[in-house]
Amino acid sequence: MSATPLPPGQPPPPPGADGAGGLPPPPGTDMTGICFRDQLWLNTYPLDRNLVFDYFALSPFYDITCNNESLRSRQIHPLDMSQLTKMTGMEYVLSDVIEPNLFVIRKQKRESPEKANPMLAYYILDGSIYQAPQLCNVFASRISRAMYHISKAFTMACSKLEKIANVETESDAAASESKTQKEAIDLKELKRIDHILSSLKRKIGAAPPPPPYPEGYVPPSSEQEKAPDDLLASEAPPQLDPIIDQGPAKRPRFQ
């Protein structure tokens, strides 16, 4: 594997110049909103696993202080893992490849030949280079979007409930108005009946007094009127029990 071929007689460009990697972005800079594409390079060289790192080194995502740049300066392929595992510090490795459409490059910090801590990921999709968002940013974006839709749903539900409450208030007001109208009609009818009864009373007049008792008749007193009733109550037979006195054993049988 070799680096990108240069025209004969032309020295390799120095670091930081046009065509080579620039200075690394400041720490904490979010570069997920930018995209890099060099159509002239793509028209000149094929995009495969041997030349993809040279294309990636042209982008602003490339850090010239990495170990891969040290290998390039020594005319060694920058993705040679046999050389990268002997070094420590920042490096780029090619993690996944689907030629010629997709290339995934991982930025990591190597501490030993067996241990490397991943930091960022970049992918080259059809010649365009992007920085992959971090997992925490993906979760934050999805949660923010979900909260927006939930808030919007609650707002719509509140507006629907307000409309329903207004309709119920209007129906209650209409029912109270109809009830008031009915009560007013009943009062009118009551006044009309009172007027008819008073007019009839004036026409017929007062009831005549009861006729006098005949001579020699003595009206009974209240105690004498109650005495026959008490006597009848004492002489009345006791009430029949519906179960004991009128049960199936007491009923007559017809043969």
Image (cartoon, rainbow, N blue to C red):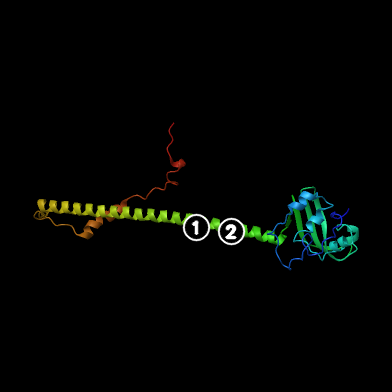
Q: Position of residue 208 (x, y in %)?
A: 10, 53
Q: Which of marks 1 and 2 is nearer the N terminus?
A: 2
Tell me the kind of residue under disc 2. Answer: Tyr
**201 or 69: nearer the viewer:** 69
Mark 2 element type: helix
| Tag 1 residue | 158
Q: Position of residue 140 (x, y in %)?
A: 66, 61
| Residue 82 visible in the displayed image | yes
Tell me the kind of residue under disc 1. Answer: Cys
Classify 10 Å Cα crowding around label 2: few (below 14), some (14-19), many (20 and above).
few
**40 or 230: nearer the viewer:** 40
Query: 148 left or right of 19?
Result: left
Query: 141 left or right of 112?
Result: left
Q: Which mark is residue 148?
A: 2
Query: 170 left or right of 9?
Result: left
Q: In which quarter of the image is residue 53?
A: bottom right
Q: Where is residue 129 in the image (x, y as percent from the top left)?
A: 74, 55
Mark 1 element type: helix
Which residue is drawn at the image coordinates 25% and 52% (left, top)?
185
The total of numbered circles placed on residues is 2
